[in-house]
Structure formats: C-alpha cells, structure tokens
C-alpha cells in the first residue's frame, strides 16, 4: 500500500493529544484565512460566504470541498445529502433546518432554525451537481462544525477515529473516493501547522461502503470469501501439479491428467520444488582428526592438573596456588568455548530454485516482503554520508521494489539526519536505475567508485562509460551537498533549527520532542528518472520525554518494529547498522532461501550474516575483522541450534520477534508402548475398549430416560452458554493481546497475521495516525515489550539477549555465508575506540550474567539444546576471565624479580606432559584454521587481542557491571565513531588516551623490566643460573608477544616520534634505575666468595 503524506513530515504525541503536519517546502505552506478568503463554490461558481466568526463557510468536514451555503442547503434538501467529492453525508450545521436522516447530535440542536424552510427556494442554485449513488457515511467526529479553524488534529486516537491531515486542498489520485484521504481545508490552517479539535463521539463510527450499494461486499469481487476459495483451490491445483516428478512413473500418472507428463515445463517445475538450501558438512578428513585432538587434549589436561596439584612449590607456595587456580579457570573457559564447535557445518543456497518457485514468468512475484531497519543516533559520530550510502544500497537491492521498505531510525532527532535523508531520496532516483541497468556491485556509491578494480570487466553496454562518468559527477555533487549540511550543523542557532516553511524543528530538544514520521519514497507517485517505482523510504524518530526510560538502541528497534507493522507489516525484518551497507545485491534472496524453504523454513527465527569490514589495514593489528569468531565459532554454532545474533546483518521472522514459540513438528503416534510386548498392549487395549463401550451403553440408557422437551431446553441453554463463552473468550483474548503488545488495535491485529500485510481498506491517514501512537514514549508501559516481545531490555548488548530468548522458545537460526559478502561496514581501527567497543560488549555480558536471563539458570524446559547453552554461558562468562588473566600475566615478572617459579624442578614425566599439552593446543588451532578457512595471521591476531582486551576492556567492564548491578551506578553508552580522516589508515595511528590503557601498559613495562633484571642476574651469577631462567623468560616473552600490538599502538606512526614515547621512556628509565640499584648485579647475593678474594677479614 502506498503511503500518501504529500511530502510532509508527520509529528505528534499520542499522550499529549498533539498531531502536527509540517511542510517540507514553501510550496505546500499552509496559508492563512485572509489569503484564502473569496473561495469559489465548485457547484455554482459563486463566492463562498464568510461566517459570523470571520472564517469561510465549510460544508464538508471530511474533505473541505468548496461549496457555498445555498448549494449546501439545496443538496441536503433536494439532492443526495452528500459531498460531491468524498461522498460523505453532509452533517447538519447550526442555523440549517433539519432534514430526513439527521441524527441527534450534541451542540447542533437549535430549535430556532430547526424547521425554517421559508427561504430555501430562493436560495436554490441555478444548477446543482448531484453526487453518484453511495451509501450513507456517518461522521465519527463530534457534532461541532469545524468552521473556526480548529481542524481534525490534536485528539487521542483511543477516543475515536482520529485521522491526520495529508494534503492541502488537493484530491489524492492514489486513493479512491470510498477510501479517501482527508484533504486539509486551506482556510483552517495556521503557519505552525498545529490544530486541535474536540473529541469525537465514540459511539459513532465510519461505515464501510461497497462499490455497489445494492450488493454485499462479502458476496462479490476481489477479497470476498468466494474469491478466496477460488484462489485457494487454484493454488492447490498448481501445487499438486508441481508435485509431479518424472521418475515416479505410471503409478502416479493415473492420478493426474493424461497429458500432464508431456508438459515441457515439468523439468523446470521439478527443479523448482527442490530444497532452496542445503547443509554441507565438514569433510570427515578434517573434522574427525579435530575431534580426536580435542579428546586427546582433555586427557592431557587431566594429566597436567594431576601433576600440578600433586607437586606444589614449597618455597613459593603462594605463587603456585595462584597459578593453579588461574589454570583451572582457563581450562573451564576452554571447554565452554571448544565443545560448541563440535558439529561445524556450511550451507549452500540455490537462488535459481527460489526464482522458479516464487517468481513465475508473467505473474506477480510471490517473494515475501521485507522491512529493513537502519539505526543511527549521533550524526557527528555516524556521518550522514555513511548512512546515506547504506540507504542507497538498500534502495538498489535486487528484490521486487514493492516488497522492500526501508525505515531509518533517528534516535537523536537530528535535523541534519532528516535533511541528509531528503537529499538521499532525491539522489536515489538517479542511482537506483543506474545500478539495476548495469548490474553493478557494490551498490553503495562511495565504495563502488573507490574500489581499485577494472570496472569495465563484464560490461558490454555501449553507454556504460558515459553514464558511469555522469553518475560519478552526480555523486560528487551529492557529497558536496551533504558536506555542506554537516558544516551548517556545526553551529546550532540559539533559537534552534527551523524548517523551510518557518516551522521550528520538533527535535530541537533531543530529550523532549514528539514522535516524527516522514515518508520520503513510496508515496505520491514518486518514481525514478526512468519512471519505475522505488522502494518505500520512511524517516522515524520516536517520541522522547523526560522521566521515561527509552532503552537506547533496543527501544529504538522496538519502535521500528511497531511502526513498520502498522505501515507495511512485512513478515520478515532486516536490521543493519548505519555503517553496514549491502555489499551483495542478492543478500535478501540468500536469506529467503532459508526463510521461505517449505520444508525447514517455518522453524527459522533469523538468518545471520557474517560481518565484514572495509578500511582495515592489511595486518589487522587489533583483530577488527574478528575472523576466528565469524568463520570458526559461528560455523560450529550453526551445526547446533544456530548462530547467536550479533546486532546487525540479520534477517528476522517478525512472528519470532513477537515472542511466539516455534512451531512444533508433529510426531507420529506410537502403536505400542516400549516396555511391554505387543500382545500385552493389545490385550490392555481390548480391555479398555470393553470398559469404554460399557460406559457408553450406560450413558445411552440414561439419556433415553429423558424427555424430548428437556433435551430441547438443555440444548437451547447450552447454545446460549456457548455464545456467551465465545464472546467472553474473544474479549479475554483481546485483553491479553493488548496487555502483551500495547493499546493499539491496529498493531495487535497485525501481530496475528503471520504472513504480514495491512488491511486494504485502511487509508494512509489512519495508518500514519496509528504509527505516531505506537512510537509514543509511554506505549510500552505495562506491556511485555523488552521482556518477552521484540528486542529484550536489560543489557547494552541487546543482541545476545534477544537471540537467546528466541532459542529458548524453540526456534533455530541459520548462518549464511555467501561467496560475496552480504554486508560490509566500517570498524574502529584506532586502539582506544576498539577498546571502548570491546568494553561495551563485555559490559553487556556482565549485565546478562547478573540478571535473571543468565543462561546458567534461565531457559530450562524450553527448546534450548545443551551445547547451545554452553555457548551462551561462554558469551556471558568470558569477562570474568580478565581477573585470572591479569594475575597470570603478572606472574612472570614476579618470578623474574624474586627468583622463584610456579613450577618445581621439572622431571622427565613432567616434561612429556607439558610438551603434549603445548602440541595439542597448537594442533587444535591448526585444524580449526584448516576447516574454518582462517589464516595464521588472523588466528594469531585474535590470540593477541584476547590478552589485550582481557586485561583492559574486560576488566573495566567487570567492575562497571558490578557497580551498575550492585551499586546502581549507571554507565553511559558510547557510540563508536564510524568516520575517519582523509588519509588511508590515518586513524590507525591516532592516539587517544584512556584509562583502559593503564593495565596493559603496566603489564608490559613490568614484564620488560623483569626480563632485563633476570638476564642481568643470570650474567652476574654464571652459567648455572641460565637453566632455571629459561622457563621464566619463556613465560615473560609469552606475555610480551601477546601485548606487542598494544606496544605498537602506543608508539604511534613510524615516521614520527610522538610525545608519549618520550614520557614512557623517562618513566621506564626511572623504574629500571631504581631496580638496578636495588638488585646491584655486581655483588653476589650471598656476599663475596672468600676463596676467590683471598683476604682474611678477621685479621
């Protein structure tokens, strides 16, 4: 359904009874009454009179069709008593006589003119235009005539039919007269666009008019019961035809038409009924050795701990005990991480089969609709140009345009984002046809024009070079316009921002503003430059008021779920971050291969795509690509119950977001029990049947004793009780749904439509009014939003919690890895930003661990598999590893400075155990890299950043989480910066001081000092001290190598020496000097050796 807003911004607050229509340009500016005085009657061409209140006469409160008072009276007395434009029945206005059909209305009864017919004949116009046949249409508004300029805005939708104003004195071509949109009378407008009206009469309602009044709408035409039955019968015949398979032979041929097997389309149909995707298990030559090594590593771990516990270090008991506790924790953490990777799989999709099944030639596409969510908050940290590229890649996706709707959530209510999106919608009219004409990839212009490849490869169109050059010039001009908007937004006026028509921007106060909705594309007949339809593009900014908890990103996503359900209600939802553009134009089709698969698609709650990133240096110093997680861990989870939700690049089933359980597969009933022989079960069944028959005979005898009158009376009573019970049940169901989903009848009704869609008789006006309602700040109060419905609240990492709840409901998820990455984004390659990003993730895990939703104790008895539970436990427990990791990384320096060690003198048996442990660890990693397709560099960077993040971000997240949960100290959500400098990888060398750098810096310096002291001590004490020193040095070098990327991050760019190096050099020199003086390596710790000295001090 096309949304018609006249190109204007809809803003309002349901709780405050406000509804505002703001013009986007000067053309649509609301004119004053003085400007519009002297309107011409569209029936008699006379001038419309001015009332005693000084305002033009209004005959129709629905469309404000210009009609003078004599024509209005004549039409009511002699004509059809309806407006010639919208066919709405004229209501009696004060001062007009009553005619047949008028109802008693409040505030309109004036006995003085009730039967004043005296001068009507003189007022009859020379000619009158009658309206066509139509049924009577009762107005749901109050009886007070809207002649004072107080229009139809500003009342609560819960009191009646409140419909927003869409156009200004213009008839909407897209909406029929029976389902017309309201037309704003120009003479009731004000420059502010704010109107108010009395509350409507709740007893009155709009009656649905049929196209032919003599016929019932349910008995004819499209959408009727008979039509649906015919369509279902036709679909069944088509489906039966598709089930024909050639190799079934003559046995099945007899059940079909004689010539069906001669149909030339049968091979294509047979291909179209095949599965749309399949699992590809890892080759046994790779996975079996991997599992064998895991078991072997478990056995070696048992021997290792047996030796460690039974051989304490007596002269360093504290160090030994500390190290053993840390090693036990590391072993448990490894088990939680390792066993969910026991069943790794890969998947393959068949896009050609998807097209054969759902896109038949000459027929409308049967692919499911998708609503795509793009979330943004701060345009200064998330540049509008990046958001614009994401939106452009969505609008140009290879999918039926009528089935794609893009919703952009501006949670910062920034006018910069709004204006940038307006520019983006205009540029999309040129960009989208260019992408589809030449089939280019990627369809984000910034990345398409910047890629260093041969763009002429596989291009055969003769005009491609010329049109590409023109499009690049258009994009450069588009970038200049966006950059100018950003430059203007740097200085905010004291009075706040103002729209082009002079209306103040509703979001000037970020923490206190109404909800805003603007439909940029998909309405008003807006097409691209070639005349083709474009996907719907909607701007949404939910209402925010002081005193309400808005739940950050999770609350914004839930607002998008509701507003999209009211406007388009697609059965599937894709969410992406503002910096994650669609890199593969067929990504949506890839997801539909799983979601729309007739055999297994019904149980899939979401399809998760891996995250891939642009703009990262070749060495990936801080493991931004996170390849080990996306290419190894997620493949392992896909073999269980599915991957976890990672916050972006995920296609959801809307029905699963609403908190419904997964469909249960029906199991065939067992014929006999498992514990007894069949003959025993048959005997038991016979006995039960005999007893049952005896009871039935007795019941029949009792019934025969009753008289027929009593039976008739009882049946009558039962029928009445059934009717009452059915009414009560439906009422209770409605109350239960409203308690779960909120007080919006339209939205509650949409949740029951598993296949999506909106009512065809709903007008754009009513949908937009309800959309403003569902994004009001108090809508979620006393509902299950954030608890059981939508994105789950209670953690800054709402993604893990939301996916976990779905898996607990029995759903399964799918991991889709197409050859061409589906989505690409930008990563914070700066060290400080990267640590802050990891800090937020770890903080969310700590919050989940301390909540009722912790997977250790939540979700039992549901559909969560035990290996899947282990993976979720690992995802919330890993921040706690920071404490033993920090302690363990400090032990090498302590051992080197004190001369002690955590392991006693190693025997041959201990050497074998230690070597076996190191070998199994290395072989496990090698085999994972082999079946996961991960390189050694990526694996090693991941190991390094596990230590760097563990001793910094994870540690701080742990303490922040404990303070937040136990002490109530809240932490602010930090938006990761998505923009960089102009130079390539320039942000990589940008140094930003943060407290997160203190722990790893301290560890690095202490271990370096320990190595220097240990080597100096060995040089001083001779050859025998090098043997014990080797183990301590190896331990210290293990820590330093893992912290090496952090050390490079501190030093900055190679071509220059930043000030921080000088500071750390002075600090390091001071520490080394003090330790050197204390150690004094030139003097033996036991004093001088007298035999060497040759002096007798006693003399």
Image: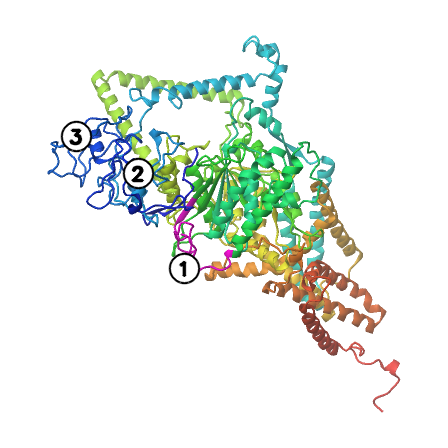
In this rendering, would 519 be left or right of 922?
Answer: left
Where does label 2 land, which residue?
Answer: 161
Magenta residues span 488-517
Where does label 3 land, which residue?
Answer: 99
Classify 939 as above or below 227. below
Tell me the crowding category of disc 3: few under 14, some 14 to 19, or many 20 or more residues within 10 angstroms, Cα based: some
In front of the other: label 3 or label 2?
3
Return the disc, 2 or 1, that comes first in the chain's sequence. 2
Rendering quarter of residue 815: top right
Relative depth, front residue between 6 and 311: 6
Quadrant of the drawing holding the C terminus: bottom right
In front of the other: label 2 or label 1?
1
List x then y, in percent, for residue 720.
Answer: 25, 26
| Real-space Cα separation, disc 3 to disc 1, in angstroms | 53 Å
| Real-space Cα separation, disc 3 to disc 2, in angstroms | 26 Å
Q: How is the image coloured?
A: rainbow
Tell me the crowding category of disc 2: few under 14, some 14 to 19, or many 20 or more residues within 10 angstroms, Cα based: many
User: Quick one: SS at disc 1?
Assistant: loop
List x then y, in percent, for residue 885.
Answer: 64, 59
Where does label 1 land, which residue?
Answer: 495
In this rendering, would 763 be left or right of 409?
Answer: left
In this rendering, would 76 be left or right of 386?
Answer: left
């Amino acid at each position: 359904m096309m949304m018609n807003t006249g190109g204007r911004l809809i803003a309002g607050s349901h709780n405050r009874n406000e509804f505002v229509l703001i013009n986007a340009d000067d053309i649509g500016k609301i004119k004053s009454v003085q400007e519009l005085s002297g309107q011409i009657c569209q029936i008699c061409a006379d001038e419309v009179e001015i009332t005693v209140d000084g305002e033009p006469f209004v005959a129709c409160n629905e469309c404000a069709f210009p009609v003078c008072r004599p024509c209005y009276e004549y039409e009511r007395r002699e004509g059809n008593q309806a407006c010639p434009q919208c066919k709405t029945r004229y209501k009696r206005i004060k001062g007009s006589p009553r005619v047949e059909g008028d109802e008693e209305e409040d505030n309109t009864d004036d006995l003085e003119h009730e039967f004043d017919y005296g001068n009507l004949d003189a007022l009859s116009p020379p000619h009158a235009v009658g309206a066509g046949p139509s049924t009577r249409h009762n107005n749901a508004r109050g009886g007070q005539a809207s002649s004072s300029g107080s229009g139809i805005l500003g009342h609560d939708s819960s009191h009646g039919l409140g419909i927003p104003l869409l156009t200004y004195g213009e008839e909407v071509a897209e909406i029929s007269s029976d389902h017309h949109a309201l037309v704003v009378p120009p003479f009731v407008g004000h420059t502010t666009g704010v109107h108010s009206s009395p509350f409507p009469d709740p007893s009155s309602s709009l009656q649905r008019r049929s196209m032919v009044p003599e016929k019932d709408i349910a008995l004819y035409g499209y959408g009727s019961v008979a039509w649906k039955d015919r369509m279902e019968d036709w679909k069944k015949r088509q489906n039966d035809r598709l089930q024909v398979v050639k190799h079934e032979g003559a046995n099945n041929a007899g059940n079909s038409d004689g010539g069906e097997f001669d149909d030339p389309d049968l091979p294509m149909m047979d291909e179209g009924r095949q599965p749309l995707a399949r699992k590809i298990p890892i080759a046994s030559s790779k996975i079996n050795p991997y599992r064998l090594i895991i078991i072997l590593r478990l056995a070696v771990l048992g021997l290792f701990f047996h030796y460690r516990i039974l051989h304490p270090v007596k002269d360093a008991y504290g160090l030994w005990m500390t190290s053993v506790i840390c090693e036990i924790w590391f072993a448990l953490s490894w088990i939680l991480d390792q066993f969910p990777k026991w069943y790794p799989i890969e998947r393959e999709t068949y896009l050609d089969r998807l097209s054969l099944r759902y896109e038949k030639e000459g027929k409308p596409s049967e692919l499911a609709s998708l609503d795509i969510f793009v979330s943004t908050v701060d345009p200064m940290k998330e540049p509008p140009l990046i958001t614009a590229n994401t939106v452009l890649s969505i609008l140009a996706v290879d999918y039926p345009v009528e089935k794609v709707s893009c919703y952009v959530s501006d949670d910062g209510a920034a006018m910069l984002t709004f204006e940038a999106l307006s520019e983006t919608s205009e540029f999309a009219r040129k960009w989208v046809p260019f992408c589809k004409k030449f089939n280019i990839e990627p369809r984000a212009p910034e990345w398409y024009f910047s890629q260093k490849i041969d763009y002429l490869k596989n291009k055969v169109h003769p005009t491609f070079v010329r049109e590409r050059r023109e499009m690049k010039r258009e994009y450069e001009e588009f970038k200049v316009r966006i950059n100018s908007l950003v430059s203007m937004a740097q200085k905010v006026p004291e009075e706040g921002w103002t729209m082009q028509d002079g209306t103040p921007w509703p979001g000037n106060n970020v923490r206190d503003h109404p909800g805003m909705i603007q439909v940029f594309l998909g309405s008003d007949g807006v097409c691209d430059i070639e005349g083709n339809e474009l996907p719907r593009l909607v701007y949404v900014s939910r209402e925010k008021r002081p005193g309400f908890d808005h739940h950050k990103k999770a609350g914004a996503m839930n607002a998008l779920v509701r507003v999209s359900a009211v406007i388009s209600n697609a059965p599937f939802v894709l969410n992406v971050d503002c910096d994650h553009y669609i890199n593969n134009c067929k990504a949506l089709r890839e997801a539909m291969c799983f979601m729309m698969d007739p055999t297994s698609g019904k149980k899939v709650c979401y399809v998760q795509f891996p995250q891939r990133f642009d703009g990262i240096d070749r060495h990936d110093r801080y493991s931004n690509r996170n390849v080990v997680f996306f290419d190894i861990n997620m493949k392992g989870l896909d073999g269980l119950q599915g991957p976890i939700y990672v916050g972006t690049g995920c296609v959801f089933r809307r029905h699963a977001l609403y908190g419904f359980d997964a469909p249960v597969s029906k199991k065939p009933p067992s014929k006999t029990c498992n514990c007894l022989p069949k003959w025993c079960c048959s005997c038991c069944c016979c006995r039960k049947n005999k007893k049952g028959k005896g009871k039935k005979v007795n019941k029949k005898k009792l019934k025969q004793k009753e008289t027929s009158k009593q039976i008739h009376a009882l049946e009558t009573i039962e029928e009445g009780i059934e009717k009452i019970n059915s009414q009560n049940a439906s009422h209770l169901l409605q109350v239960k749904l409203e308690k779960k989903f909120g007080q919006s009848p339209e939205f509650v009704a949409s949740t029951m439509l598993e296949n999506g869609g909106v009512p065809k008789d709903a007008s754009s006006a009513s949908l937009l009014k309800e959309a403003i309602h569902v994004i009001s700040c108090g809508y979620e109060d006393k509902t299950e939003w954030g608890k059981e419905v939508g994105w789950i609240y209670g953690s800054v990492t709402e993604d893990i919690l939301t996916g976990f709840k779905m898996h607990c409901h029995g759903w399964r998820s799918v991991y889709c890895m197409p050859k061409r990455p589906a989505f690409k984004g930008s990563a914070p390659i700066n060290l400080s930003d990267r640590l802050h990003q990891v800090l937020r993730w770890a903080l969310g895990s700590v919050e989940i661990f301390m909540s009722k939703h912790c997977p250790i104790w939540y979700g039992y008895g549901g559909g969560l598999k035990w290996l899947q539970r282990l993976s979720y436990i690992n995802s919330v427990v890993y921040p706690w590893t920071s404490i033993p990791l920090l302690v363990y990384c400090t032990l090498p320096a302590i051992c080197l400075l004190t001369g002690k060690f955590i392991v006693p003198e190693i025997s041959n048996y201990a050497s074998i155990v230690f070597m076996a442990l190191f070998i199994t660890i290395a072989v496990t990693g090698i085999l994972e890299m082999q079946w996961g397709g991960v390189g050694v560099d990526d694996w090693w960077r991941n190991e390094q950043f596990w230590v760097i993040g563990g001793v910094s971000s994870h540690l701080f997240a742990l303490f922040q989480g404990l303070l937040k949960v136990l002490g109530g100290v809240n932490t602010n959500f930090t938006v990761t910066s998505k923009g960089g400098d102009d130079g390539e990888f320039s942000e990589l060398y940008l140094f930003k001081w943060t407290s997160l750098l203190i722990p790893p810096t301290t560890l690095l310096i202490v271990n370096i000092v320990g190595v220097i002291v240990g080597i100096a001590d060995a040089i001083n004490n001779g050859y025998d001290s090098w043997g014990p020193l080797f183990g301590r040095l190896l331990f210290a070098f293990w820590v330093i190598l893992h912290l090496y990327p952090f050390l490079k991050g501190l030093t900055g760019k190679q071509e220059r020496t930043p000030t921080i190096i000088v500071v750390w050099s002075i600090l390091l020199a001071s520490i080394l000097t003090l330790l050197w003086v204390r150690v004094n390596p030139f003097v033996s710790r036991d004093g001088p050796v007298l035999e060497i000295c040759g002096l007798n001090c006693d003399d």
